[in-house]
Image (cartoon, helix red, strand yellow):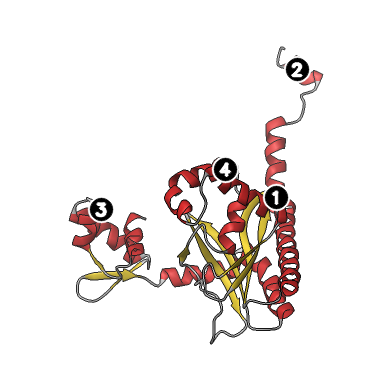
Amino acid sequence: MSVLQLFEAGDAVWTVEEIAQRLGVSVRTAYRTVAELTQNGFLDPGSGEGYVLGPAFIRFDRIIRQSDPLIRFASPGMAELLAAYGRRAAVLLCRRFRDCVMCVHSLESEPSRPMASYERGVGMSPFRGAPAKIMLSFLQDRVLRGIYLRNEHAIRASGIESWQQFRDVLQDIRKDGFVVTKSEIGKSRVGIAAPILRGDQILASLSLVVEPGARADIERLSAVVKRVAADISAKLTAADTVGSPSKGRAVANRKQTRTGPRPSAVTLRRRGT
């Protein structure tokens, strides 16, 4: 995993010697790791003696797009949002990844003229923009406190002067159930975001990106975004509640094995108890 994380820095090609030096391991160890990753398609020989990321990532990306329940349940609602607006817009499905916000799926009404500044798989600010703010607002206080302490300088630079103000702003967003931001990520763009929850835990954000419009229009769209996000949350929660039949049978079998049939009095006498 540490070898693959080297590519996050932006260098597309790494030699075995460079990998060994950066990770502080022997060339022999690095070569063995690179050989295993190459065999499984996670690395591919590049120009010269270097290696690049391999085709396995493309395969797994396709698997995620097809099998991820979040994307599967959210896609119809995202299409509904675009249809409800009826003009040039983008709909984003974002998640938190480490200390950033990442788009995992998006729809554009005009793909040749994209509205959103978010690109699938690219880490964005955890504090600016509607997707970031709505997800922050649904985190527990102890998690928020840790985020604030690790990023106090950046948060203060955004105009927040204290932990209490940071917490109060996010509590107001949570109470509303949605947030509207203007030109925080893209110039002349309005972002409207609502939370997607699994039970009471924040899982993702659903966002509509549009051009600035009348206040009544933004309020109407905010209500639609909030409703669609709630529908997606309900589907995810229902899917978790129902579960698969095989899991249900496995749980029942474990309970039966753990408790077992109660021995009869005859059996107890035969055991001499």
The residue pinned by badge 1 equals: 199
Callout 3 secondary element: helix
Q: Which percent across, then down, holds residue 203?
A: 61, 55
Q: Write down the residue under mark 4.
A: 164
Name the residue type under label 1.
Answer: Gly
Residue type of the residue flagged with mark 3: Leu
- Residue at the far top: name it: 273
Q: Can you say which quadrant of the picture contains the N terminus? A: bottom left
Secondary element at image label 1: loop
Q: Decide: is 262 above or below 226.
A: above
* Residue displayed at 72% across by 30% down: 259
Q: Nearer the viewer, mark 4 or mark 1?
A: 4
**Given the image, on which type of amino acid does mark 2 rest?**
Leu
Number of other residues with Cα within 10 Å of mark 3, as a class: few under 14, some 14 to 19, many 20 or more:
few
Question: How far is the residue under mark 2 from the one under mark 4?
Answer: 66 Å
Label 4: how many Cα within 10 Å (few below 14, some 14–19, many 20+): few
Q: Quadrant of residue 43?
A: bottom left
Q: Which residue is mark 3?
A: 23
- Residue 268: mark: 2
Identify residue type, mark 4: Gln
> In screen coordinates, is 10 left or right of 98?
left
N-term-proximal mark, 2 vs 4: 4
| N-terminal-most mark, 4 or 3 | 3
Depth check: give the residue in front, 268 or 9: 9
User: Percent position (x, y) of residue 253?
Assistant: 70, 41
Q: Estimate the x, y position of residue 252 in percent, counting from the top left.
A: 72, 42
